[in-house]
Amino acid sequence: MKFYIDEDLCTGCGICEEMCPEVFQVGEDEISHIISEEECEEHGIREVAAECPSEAIIFMEEET
């Protein structure tokens, strides 16, 4: 599963970092960044995305 953070939507609220600190970190620029794509399982990332108030965590369809 591939995902990214839409920096134009991210408000830097930190919910993603609180829920999954091994994957997300809010930087000095007050935007969340992905620090590891491998640490949280897919369902964990989807839960985090569902809690993001600005819907900034975007999933990409993987080619098969």
Image (cartoon, rainbow, N blue to C red):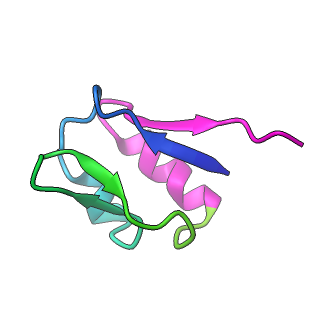
> Residue at position x 49%, y 51% from top?
47
- For the view shown, which residue lies furthest in the right direction? 64
> Residue at position x 39%, y 73% from top?
22
Give the residues in magenta.
Answer: 42-64
Total number of numbered labels?
A: 0
> Residue at position x 46%, y 67% from top?
36
Relative to 6, residue 18 above or below: below
Q: Provide residue 35's location: percent of width, then percent of height.
A: 38, 65
Q: Provide residue 7's location: percent of width, then percent of height.
A: 30, 34
> Residue at position x 21%, y 53% from top?
14
Relative to 38, residue 54 above or below: above
Q: Provide residue 13's location: percent of width, then percent of height.
A: 17, 45
Whether the magenta-drawn stretch holds residue 46 is answered as yes
Task: Specify whether 12 is left or right of 64.
Answer: left
Task: Specify whether 13 is left or right of 17.
Answer: left
Q: Quadrant of residue 24?
A: bottom left
Q: For the C terminus, give its image quadrant.
A: top right
Whether the magenta-drawn stretch holds residue 44 is answered as yes
Q: Provide residue 23's location: percent of width, then percent of height.
A: 41, 65
Task: Specify whether 42 is left or right of 58.
Answer: right
Q: Quadrant of residue 60?
A: top right
